[in-house]
Image: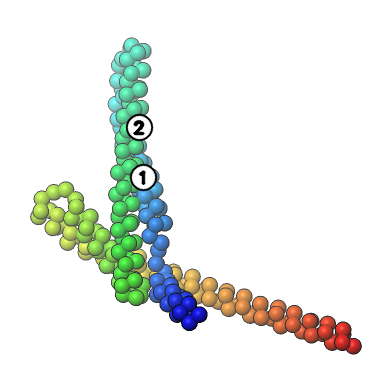
Amino acid sequence: MEASGKHEETHSNRTERLAGTVNWGTATVIGLFAGMLYGGSKEAAASVRKDAEVMLKLGSTPDKREQYRLMRDAMEKRFVRVTRGSIVGGIRLGMFTAGFYGLQNLLAEKRGIHDVFNVVGAGSATAATFGLIMPGSLKWRARNVVLGSVLGAALCFPLGWLHLKLVEKANEGNTTTTAKDSREMGEVKSGLGAAIDRLEENLNK
């Protein structure tokens, strides 16, 4: 029993320390689908100009079979471009989201507290890593690493601060609601106990 109590206490302390962190799996899935949507939409918008070129070719081609072939080829190419854009966009944003929130949760666990510095560190490290793996010369990659780390920290500081403030407000509201519910339950229980006492007195008479 004592060991179980210690385990529950340790688990509750860990949960309190990590309050406000985002679920890594959920964030990765959301980033994956958002990247797929963005990449597909971008390629679909870029296909408008190419569709206009196809329409010009159709207007200058009297043969019906040739028109059908041009339309079929244009639709197939559009489908391939949109699909490729969705896959690439989903992988890129999914990897970025997974790396960012994974590092953020890791820093929160190692430091024992979740604050804005975890968000800044995760954003800076993730942006620097993506700058390193981008194609280009070594000098270009080094520039991307420095630029990515600075921009990542600069963008994540206000966003992380805002996120933590919103989490604090939400936790305050939940605490107030829980305390109110506890008082109401206590009043209900006290009223029920008084009713039971009166019933026992009537039965004893």
Q: Amino acid at mark 1?
A: Met
Label at residue 36: 1
**Measuring 23% from the left and 55% from the top, which residue is drawn there?**
130
Would residue 102 be found to the left or right of residue 14 on screen?
left
**Measuring 25% from the left and 64% from the top, which residue is drawn there?**
124
- Quadrant housing residue 177: bottom right
- Quadrant housing residue 49: top left
Would residue 77 be found to the left or right of residue 172 on screen?
left
Residue hosting label 2: 79
Please indicate, yes or no, whether residue 116 appears anywhere in the rendered image.
no
**Measuring 31% from the left and 72% from the top, which residue is drawn there?**
110
Q: Kindly give the residue lying farthest to the top in the view shown.
A: 63
Q: Is residue 122 above or below residue 66?
A: below
Q: Amino acid at mark 2?
A: Phe
Q: Secondary structure at mark 2?
A: helix
> Which one is in front, 70 or 177?
177
Q: Is residue 17 above or below residue 52?
A: below
- Mark 1 or 2, nearer chain start: 1
Q: Looking at the picture, how far across and down is residue 75, in whole percent?
A: 35, 27
Q: Looking at the picture, how far across and down is residue 57, in whole percent?
A: 29, 20
Q: Looking at the picture, how far across and down is residue 182, in whole percent?
A: 61, 78
**Measuring 21% from the left and 63% from the top, which residue is drawn there?**
149
- Quadrant housing residue 70: top left
Q: Secondary structure at mark 1?
A: helix
> Which one is in front, 102 or 167?
102
Label at residue 4: none
